[in-house]
Structure formats: structure tokens, C-alpha cells
Amino acid sequence: MKVHIHETVQRLMELEVLVARLRDLRRNYETTASVEALIESLCSSLPLPVLLDHRRWSAEGRQSVAEVRGQCCSACGDLLPRMELAALRRGALKRCAQCGRYFYLVEADQLRPV
């Protein structure tokens, strides 16, 4: 399996995991300082427009990233043009034209049965 994830999208994915962890810690009244520090570090490494998108979607309870499955956005089902898929394979940062989420691409190995 080959994974194509732009560095910014990888950081967004990590950020979403940490934010969910922070919510769980707060729910259980546990210490959150270390998780908050990690979140701040990730936020400071993101381009400002990407961070603003993430915060807006997070406030709405939505994720800021989506996997491309086949040729479709896993969040909204929009079909990606072949040029967009090629750009993702080259490591470009791409967004869905329909829902605006940032893409990552996971391709299954093209194994044929013997």
C-alpha cells in the first residue's frame, strides 16, 4: 500500500487526534498541559490559512482532512479529476473543490493473484 500525504495534511491528522485526546482528558478531569503543548506546537507549524480552516471545521465538529478513495473524496463523494490525483501522487497539497477538506491518498498495491 502506498500512501501520499502532504506534510501539512499529516500535521492536520495529528492535530485532530490530539484534539480528540484533549476532549477525553477534559471529560475525565485529567491533566491536559502536555497535550495542549503538543497542539500549540502543531498549530504553530501549520500555514495560517490551513490553521484557520482547521479551526473553523473543528468548531463545527468536522474533520479538516479526507482520504481519496478510488477517485472520490471520502467526506463528500466528489469525483477528483485525474490531474488532481496526479498532483497528490507528486506530494502536492490539494483540497476538495466541493467540501474544502485537505486530501491524502492511500493506494492499494496493484497485486494480481497468481
Image (cartoon, helix red, strand yellow):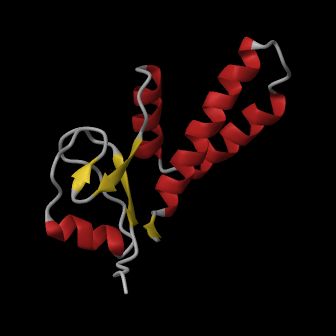
Q: Position of residue 70 (x, y in %)?
A: 25, 59
Q: Position of residue 55 (x, y in %)?
A: 47, 30
Front one among 51 and 24: 24
Task: Work out whether 57 lies above or below 69.
Answer: above
Query: What residue is rendered at 25% in x and 73% in y?
Result: 86
Number of marks present in the image shown: 0
Most extreme residue toward the right is 31
Q: Position of residue 2 (x, y in %)?
A: 45, 72
Front one among 106 and 41: 106
Q: Position of residue 62 (x, y in %)?
A: 41, 28
Give the quarter of the image for residue 75.
top left
Query: What residue is rendered at 35% in x and 78% in y?
Result: 110
Query: What residue is rendered at 67% in x and 38% in y?
Result: 39
Give the quarter of the image for residue 24.
top right
Task: Pick the quarter of the image with the C terminus.
Answer: bottom left
Task: Work out whether 45 lies above or below 55.
Answer: below
Give the quarter of the image for residue 65.
top left
Most extreme residue toward the front is 114
Task: Work out whether 21 lies above or below 102.
Answer: above
Most extreme residue toward the bottom is 114
Q: In screen coordinates, is 99 left or right of 26?
A: left
Front one among 23 and 111: 111
Query: What residue is rendered at 59% in x and 41% in y?
Result: 15
Q: In screen coordinates, is 113 left or right of 55?
A: left
